[in-house]
Image: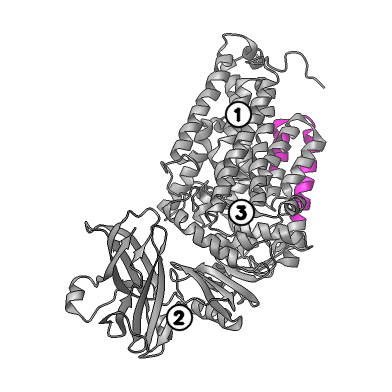
Amino acid sequence: MRPPRGQEPRPLVTAPDSDRAWVWGLAALYTATFTFFSVVKYRYYLYTDFDLAIFVQATDRILHGSFFSSIAGMNLLGAHSALNLVLLAPLFALFRHPVTLLVIQSAVLALGAIPVHRLARRRFGPGFAAVSFAALYLAFPALGYVNLFEFHPEALSTPALLFAFDYAYQGRLVPAALSATLALLGREDVACVVATMGLWLLIARRPRARATAAVFGALAAVSLVVSFGIFQPSFATGEVQYVGMYRDWGHSAAEVVANVLRHPLRMLESLVATPGDPRDTLLKQQYYLHMLLPLLLLPLLSPSTLAIAAPILVEHFLSWRHNQHAIVDQYTALVTPFVVVAAVLGLENLLRLAAGRRDWRAELARRGSRARALATAVPMLALVASLGSNLMFGPLLGRGVLQAFGPAERFWPGPEDRTLKPYRDRMVARVPHEAGVVTSFEYLARFAARGSVHSFQQLFSGHYAFSSKPYPVPSGIGAILTALGNQYEPDAAARLRQIIRADRLRPADAAGDLVLYLKSPADTLDLLASGDLVPSVATSVVYDSLLRFGGCDIPEPIAAPGGTLTLRTYWARQGPLERAYLTRLWLYDAAGRSVFFRTRYLGYGIATPDTWPAGATVRETYRLVVPGDLAAGRYRLVMQVVHRTGTVGAPAVPDDPRLAALGGMLALGVVEVR
């Protein structure tokens, strides 16, 4: 039904269909841009967390009738109610690849521009202002970070919440309820903002507010009952203990809620500061800047709309985790919709103020009026603010200005990523199709569409990611692919050796610290050997009176940029060791400048010197990957030995006073890069 005459403003630009074409074009451009960067990230192994892999595996397992994820080590319904994965599973079945979820995420997030445009169009008429708000949404830095940080089901709730708000604002109950239902399928805490959205409709006295608020409340209640009354009691067995994120407030959910209610002023303080932690205080204060500045602070002119997102803000800001207080991860997915619609309604409130006692809609339609001028100038200034914000702290253009907490993942490959890519591709391709795999974050998504794939990080730590529950050592493993030597803990090394022995794995490929173990490979690679071994360049340096360095080989001292340089070093344990040893390697050019540096644990972090037979010569073979951007020339290869006791490391003390005077910097030879 059309509103009464005079209720809708005349368009600022009379082009009733062209602005829709602009919005769809901007949405398509956004989808293409963020799909491109997502594919680049995937191609160069820049997804360095396990969320993408977990949800790829979960979607694949749904096609097999299960929500169990071996990566998470549990049924995912015991952690998050990500039921919208069921809707994605048929599409994933057609294109069974991790990139499928990344493309869907970009496309669905882009759809949020449609309800934003429709809301603005009804308030200000078709034309520049309405299109501007769609553009502001698509250029919103927090949205881009959500898109580029792994894949998360709650990201798909962002546009669904915008559609729900837009339909509810019109009083269209059925599509509003359907949109809210879709949003609720993303995660259990969506129920909080769906319920507060219903309260907002009552306060704002929108059409059919009572009915819509009742439906939203009922849907939120059902979601909470299903999540916390059915799924978590049935499937949560200690693999996730999210209540630990609120350790400053209590040790159980009930205790946390009770303390929040008992100390409301402390809770409010936590929304802007963390007492005793100035860095986290800065993060929280920058959060508001990052969420408001790209919209020219317009959301502040509609504070009641901003308040819809308050439960999510409380949820994140009471946590001790710093990344929940920044915009660079997925934690703004349920806040962004209400910040953006608050900007639209904030401009409306500004125009009301500008019109004074006059009808702001009539003033908007009158040429030369202050309201009409503001309706053009303010969105234009907001676009400038958005561009400036993206240049300062945005995901693609940002320079880290006014940003104390940057993204954990990079969005574009560097020289090392390009150099390592062919080695990574080669090793991934060698993993048998049906083999159970233990691998690190960068490679998890490659193997996620199979039933048995395990995170090396959980095996390394010995417990689940968000839990103190011990992580069981997996069995039936056919491949291990991870960077060894850049991390070491005695218990982790023992667990890794247990898998290697039990499943009869052997090293099959290596490049730098990246090593591939396979079950009975056709060609076993030499990493560590012991026996009657003699180096081609012999020496004798004893470190800490415990570890003797006997010399080295550089069989082919010529390498190409991006190629490998084989280095064999010879060692002997002189007595019992209670410390770990590392080697630091440098390449120095003819001018004495360091052009390459690498630190790594001796023995690849698995067979460390404390496990070597006393007195026996042990040879470690390391395939140093030459940087792909290294200029041709001759370089000195220099080594320093370092010991670590607990978490403290220091250069090991050589028995040669001359070498000690040089800080233990021992020249191993000269290599040529051609």
In this orientation, which residue lies closer to the viewer: 363 or 254? 363
Which residue corresponds to mark 1?
133
Q: Nearer the viewer, mark 3 or mark 2?
A: 2
Q: Earlier in the sequence, mark 2 or mark 1?
A: 1
Decide whether residue 495 is among the magenta residues. no
Label number found at residue 607: 2
Indicate which disc, 3 or 2, sits on the residue closer to the N terminus: 3
Residue 518 % position (x, y): 58, 74
Taking the spot 77% from the left edge, 59% from the top edge, the residue there is 63
Q: Which residues are magenta?
A: 196-225
- Label 1 SS: helix
> In terms of secondary structure, what is the magenta stretch mainly?
helix
| Gap in angstroms between the C-alphas marked 2 and 1 | 59 Å
- Closest to the observer: 126 or 439? 439
Q: Label 3, on which residue?
A: 261
Q: Residue at x 75, y 41 (%)?
A: 179
**In screen coordinates, is 352 left or right of 174?**
left
